[in-house]
Image (cartoon, grey):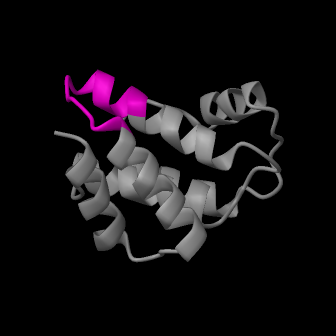
Amino acid sequence: MKISKKELIRINKGFGGNLRSDSSLDFAFERLGSKKLGAFKKLAYLIRAILVDHPFSDGNKRTAAFVIFAFAGENNKKLDRDLLLHHIVSIASKNIQDIRNIEWRLKNAIK
């Protein structure tokens, strides 16, 4: 995934948010640099950081959706928009922290 922390913060500002805490984002961006992890697992770490840890004051779900749409576009994948939105809300509302579960949900919505 080709996104920087600075770009992510800029994207979120477009949705009306501001950075509150960046420690979980730092952890997720460390994972993005790993050569041992697959693309969906890397994405799962970033999505968990955004949806579960709420690093932004507003627009966390919209920012996560934007990142997922960008990921799908970058990788020439199709996505089930309705299923994706369901998963985003579910992850956020149920505070799902398990990376495998989040990765499965992403793979389920992105083909």
Q: Report x, y in % for residue 42.
A: 35, 53
Q: Is residue 101 above or below residue 18?
A: below
Q: Report x, y in % for residue 71.
A: 35, 32
- Quadrant containing the C terminus is top left
Judged left or right of residue 94, residue 56 is right
- Quadrant containing the N terminus is top left
Q: Report x, y in % for residue 26.
A: 60, 55
Question: Image point 41% across, 38% down: which residue?
Answer: 68
Question: Image point 48% across, 74% down: which residue?
Answer: 96
Q: Is residue 1 above or below residue 74?
A: below
Along the line of sight, the residue nearer the viewer: 109 or 6: 109
Question: Image point 60% across, 47% down: which residue?
Answer: 61
**Is any part of residue 35 visible from this angle?**
no
Question: Image point 66% across, 28% down: which residue?
Answer: 11
Judged left or right of residue 78, residue 61 is right
Q: Which residues are magenta?
A: 69-81
Give the total of numbered labels.
0
